Image (cartoon, coloured by chain):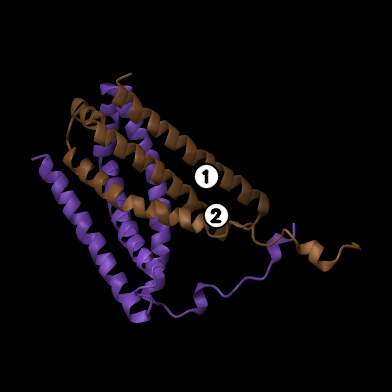
Amino acid sequence: MSLKTQLAVVRGLGSAKNGTHHWWGQRVTAVALVPLTLWFVYSVIMLTGAGYAEVAGWLASPLNTVLMLLLIAATFHHVQLGLQVVIEDYIHTEITKLTTLLFVKFASVALAVASAYAVLKIALGA
Amino acid sequence: MTTDNRPLSPHLQVYRFEWTMAYSIVHRITGVGLAVGTIFMAYWLLALAGGADSFATAQDLAGSIIGRLLLLGWTWALFYHLANGIRHLFWDAGKGLDLGTAAKSGHFMVASSVVLTGLAWIAGYSMMM
């Protein structure tokens, strides 16, 4: 039995002052992804059937490099936020949930960094 | 662990079917499918960075029957998630939330995703002519 008052027991367990942070992050990336994905789909259509030199040349142009990096950043941030909600909704065993969440977060960052590296390697001609 | 035995709220089987609920779960399914698709996007970019040989392998993979079917699925999933995502943004602004409008915008969204997928693939194939 604790001698703490009821208020002291619950203090700090309420709002972590970031209740809308996840929601807002998902909307910001969603808004950014509207033009970025349309640009990406348009680009992929225009590159259909193109060879290595043409595709590499397309990606190496400054505008396309920057847009692709922005697409990568927004996409993988949006992906990990979205998958987090799915996992939290369906996995109720704490250890499995935590493990799956960590896997998704790490995989998203790893894929984002690998993708960005590939884009920069083409762009900078390394 | 006590977490496995907690009471559950009423689930799908107690509710009458509504198109809006189907559109909602498909939004989630397409989202997960697109997340899987990002693995292929990352692979495609890395193959490009790897040089002409590895890029040719990636293009062969994408151009195979299974590759094309996957890309077709991802194209539709992308347009669905994009169009429905815009629908969500309108809801976030407080617009179109009444039942009639929500159902209508849903039907329009699905039709748009199918039409845009068709147009994108027609445009893609016309590039190879």
Q: Quadrant of the N terminus of chain B?
A: bottom right
> Quarter-wise, where is residue B66 in the image?
top left
Which residue position is annotated with label 1? Answer: A104
Q: Are marks 1 and 2 in contact (CB under 8 Å)?
A: yes
Chain letter behind tag 1: A
Q: CA distance from mark 1 to mark 2?
A: 9 Å
Q: Is residue B117 visible?
A: yes
Which secondary structure lies at badge 1? helix
Camera-side residue of B8 and A55 = A55
Which residue position is annotated with label 2? Answer: A87
Camera-side residue of A60 and A5 = A5
Please state the horizontal and vertical placement of residue A116, each as a whole percent of the image.
38, 32
Amino acid type assigned to the residue bearing label 1 in the image: Val
The colour applied to the residues of chain A in this rendering is brown
Amino acid type assigned to the residue bearing label 2 in the image: Ile
**Does B92 appear above or below A86?**
below
Looking at the image, the residue that sits furthest to the left is B129
Which secondary structure lies at badge 2? helix
The chain coloured purple carries which letter? Answer: B
Residue shown at 53% from the left, 43% from the top: A105
Q: Residues within 10 Å of mark 2 (few under 14, many from 20)?
A: some
Residue shown at 30% from the left, 52% from the top: B73
**Does B70 appear above or below A3?**
above
